[in-house]
Amino acid sequence: MSKDNRLFTFMIIPTATSKAKRISIHHNVIYITSGLMVAFILLTIFAAFRLVQHEALNLEFHSVKSENESLKKQNEAYESSYAKLKGQISYIEDVSKELARQARMENIPEVDEQVGMGGPESVSALDRAADHLERNVREIGDRLKSDLLRLASIPSGLPVNGYITDGLGIRRSPFGGGGEYHTGLDIAVDFGTPVAATADGIVIWASSHGGYGNLVAIYHSNGITTRYGHLSRITVEVGQRIKRGDQIGHAGSTGRSTGPHVHYEIRENDQPVDPLRYVEQARP
């Protein structure tokens, strides 16, 4: 079998006047060269593809890294906020316990009892704890408000600063004729001294009343009333709501009286009781 010795001849003519040059190349060289060129092109395309793929992965890596750093910062901020919120809830719980103690309420469940042992360790647990504390604080607030209203309606102190000349009980009548039952305190003061209510309530009498002279009577709560007699002038009217310390009139000597003073009386279910008992209770 004869060998294939075919040649490819290329003629090169540099210029119109130059002698033509002939170059003969074996066909195997042409095939090999063509193959190498195709391989080079394919390799270049593959390398370019890999480079683009690498750059894409690199960009994705940096994007994920940046996102992770952002998530890390957000997580740190969340943990800081979580710790702060947990501390605030703990503080509110302590305050609510103290308020409950002052309000003489039964022991309220602790936050740990509501969210499990070890305390709240999740946002949902903190939400439940916050809701629980809010209910407790509202309940305590309502109880304290009720207690304050009740205490405000209990007589405390005296209506004037003066000298107590007579107390509750049997006494010698200042008008002669033996002994008599005195239903309150007589407090000697200067004529015209302002007289103040000793508790919150509603005025149920504000005019002259027999031996009381000019009388103001105030209903408070639970059957308790106070009376302020012998006033020279009345500055309130029936139906008016009164706060402790509000002025209701001025001291005088109207009615069955021997001189300027205030007759101060406390009644429970319309029965006279010793006002000094309420004065003593008001002292710390």
Image (tube, grey):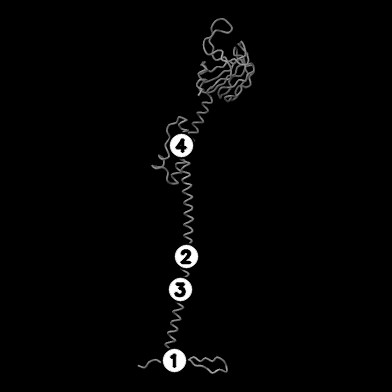
Q: Which mark is residue 94?
A: 4
Residue 240 image offset from top left, x and y in percent? 60, 24
Q: Provide the residue designation for mark 1.
A: 7
Report, in whole angstroms, how far the alpha carbon at label 4 lies from the one at label 2.
Answer: 53 Å
Which amino acid is tagged 4? Asp
Structural crowding at the residue carrying mark 4, measured as other residues with C-alpha within 10 Å and reported as few (<14), some (14–19) or many (≥20): few
Q: Residues within 10 Å of mark 3 (few under 14, many from 20)?
A: few
Mark 4–mark 1 distance (CA, rounded to whole Å) = 104 Å
Q: Secondary structure at mark 3?
A: helix
Q: Identify the mark nearer the N-term, 4 or 1.
A: 1
What is the residue that sits farthest to the left in this orientation? Answer: 1
Instruction: Indicate left or right for 195 with 281 as reference.
Output: right
Circles 2 and 3: CB atoms closer than 8 Å: no
Which residue is more in the foreground, 284 or 197?
Answer: 284
Q: CA distance from mark 3 to mark 1?
A: 35 Å
Q: Amino acid at mark 3?
A: Ala
Q: Are marks 4 and 2 in contact (CB under 8 Å)?
A: no
Instruction: Name the residue beneath numbered marker 2.
Output: 58
The x, y position of residue 194, in whole percent, is 62, 20
Q: Position of residue 217 (x, y in %)?
A: 58, 19
Q: Earlier in the sequence, mark 4 or mark 3?
A: 3
* Front: mark 2 or 1: 2
Q: Is residue 156 above or below residue 5?
A: above
Tell me which numbered mark, 2 or 3, is placed earlier along the sequence: 3
At numbered mark 1, what does the secondary structure look like: helix, strand or loop? Answer: strand
Q: Which residue is mark 3?
A: 47
- Who comes first in sequence, dot 4 or dot 2? 2
Name which residue type carries label 2: Asn
- Cα–Cα gap, marks 2 and 3: 16 Å
**Mark 2 nearby-residue class (10 Å; few <14, some 14–19, many ≥20):** few
Left or right of residue 169, residue 257 in this image: right
* Mark 2 or 1, nearer chain start: 1
